[in-house]
Amino acid sequence: MVSIEKVKKYSIEELIEYIYNNKISKDTFINAYDKSSLTIKEAESLLYNIDVSYKRINESLELELKLFYVLVPFGVINIFLHSHNSDIKRFETFKFKRKIRQYYLYSSVGSIAYIIGGILIGIFS
């Protein structure tokens, strides 16, 4: 059971960690909210924080970044491109859980593709 009195004091980042670690669905929050007696201001603030938290948890990487991470796995040339170097730090700071998982997935796929390509070039040359 979710304690609305406890959750309403959380920042968005703390709420994301709470949701992610306890695997709480949005419906659970809505049910707990319906049973609570919050003021209008508290209710608006809480609902906003819950919406933003779920958006951050579930937001996917943009196509541009997916392609970049496949072609440049784990930011191999981040020394030259500071904008992409800061992406993963920003994802971690603001708790974009899905974006972090996708960063590692696409970077791993890119790394594997380069390894296989290197092996094939070595075999056939």
Image: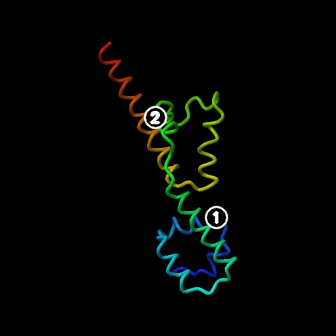
Query: In the image, residue 122 lies at what x, y percent?
Result: 35, 18
Residue at the outermost front position: 40
Q: Quadrant of residue 40?
A: bottom right
Residue at the outermost left position: 124
Separation of marks 2 and 1 at Cα, in angstroms: 30 Å
Residue at image position (46%, 34%) is 70
Of tags 2 and 1, the one toward the viewer is 1
Circle 1 is placed at which residue position? 12
Identify the element where label 2 is drawn.
helix
Q: Quadrant of residue 114?
A: top left
Query: In the image, residue 68 lies at what x, y percent?
Result: 51, 33
Q: Is residue 16 above or below residue 5?
A: above
Disc marking residue 70: 2
Amino acid on which the number 1 mark rests in the picture? Ile
Q: Is residue 54 above or below residue 44?
A: above
The 10 Å Cα crowd at callout 2, few under 14, some 14 to 19, many 20 or more, is many
Amino acid on which the number 2 mark rests in the picture? Val
Residue at image position (35%, 18%) is 121
The 10 Å Cα crowd at callout 1, few under 14, some 14 to 19, many 20 or more, is many
Task: Classify the position of the C terminus by image quarter.
Answer: top left
